[in-house]
Image (cartoon, helix red, strand yellow):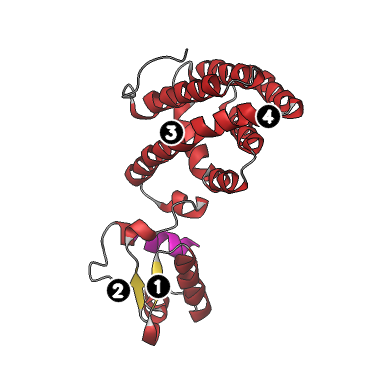
Amino acid sequence: MQVAARLTRRIVAGEFPDGRAPSELEICQEFGVSRVVARETIKILASLDIVDVAQGRRVVVRPRDEWDYLSPQLLEWLPDELVEELLRELHGMRMLLEPELAAMAAASVTDEALARMRESLDRMALLQDDPGLYLEVDQEFHMEICRAADNRILDRIMHSARWLGTASRRITSAEPAGLRRATADHARIHAALQARDPAAARAAMRFHLRDNYTALTGREHPEAPAPQ
């Protein structure tokens, strides 16, 4: 894993402009590791779609757009500036999906799901001075909305992006008063769901995500109006 991390950072830095990554033998020679370790290193990079092993066992770097950016492992190895780009792209995905998920959930949410969200809200209010635990409850609140929307494909998409979501929440929760504002946003979403009002749920989620955008980028979101 350590060798894979170092090679990933070097690939990102453009140290292999010809598109050829180190072979097993070259990894052994450079890092002083066994052929088994070198082989497993290449397997790790291939599992993240960073490299392909071409015919003749030539290891080639894949286009950066094709890497597995939903992998928590890759996220740990990328430079901060690239992670920031990914988090902005994640926000774009969330703006597309989560307001509609909230609207769908409002039409089908059960009393049991609402009760679980209410419990999460109560815990958020108690954890506003503990960002680490708060983030876990925050994420579960959003996944509860996904489950209430009753669409397994969308649920899996959101589940797969949860690692990036956690990274994003670490940034947005660091802003002064950010967690208190987030709790109020979640309460607004819960109220709309409890009222079984899809339009209000959609608007409340969009407002919450606009708040996140401001905390993430330091700029006002292009869509500025508050929810009705």
Using the rendered image of the protein, determine whether residue 174 is visible from the camera's viewpoint: no
Residue 74 badge = none
Q: Amino acid at mark 4?
A: Val
Residue extent of the magenta highlight: 1-10
Circle 1 is placed at which residue position? 52
Q: Comparing marks 2 and 3, which lies closer to the viewer?
A: 3
Circle 2 is placed at which residue position? 20
**CB atoms at circles 4 and 2 under 8 Å apart?**
no
Circle 4 is placed at which residue position? 109
Q: Earlier in the sequence, mark 2 or mark 1?
A: 2
Q: Residue at x 51, y 25 (%)?
A: 202
Q: Earlier in the sequence, mark 3 or mark 1?
A: 1
Left or right of 199? Residue 92 is left
Q: Residue at x 34, y 29 (%)?
A: 217
Mark 4 → mark 1, Cα distance in angstroms: 44 Å
Count residues near mark 2 (Cα–Cα under 10 Å), then give few for <14, some for 14-19, many for 20+.
Answer: some
- Judge whether 153 appears above or below 110 on screen: below
**CB atoms at circles 4 and 1 under 8 Å apart?**
no
Q: Comparing marks 2 and 1, which lies closer to the viewer?
A: 1
Q: Residue at x 55, y 28 (%)?
A: 103
Residue 95 badge = 3
Left or right of 216? Residue 178 is right
How far from the left and from the top, in percent, is residue 115?
74, 24
Mark 3 → mark 4, Cα distance in angstroms: 21 Å
Mark 2 → mark 3, Cα distance in angstroms: 37 Å
Q: Amino acid at mark 2?
A: Arg
Mark 2 → mark 1, Cα distance in angstroms: 10 Å
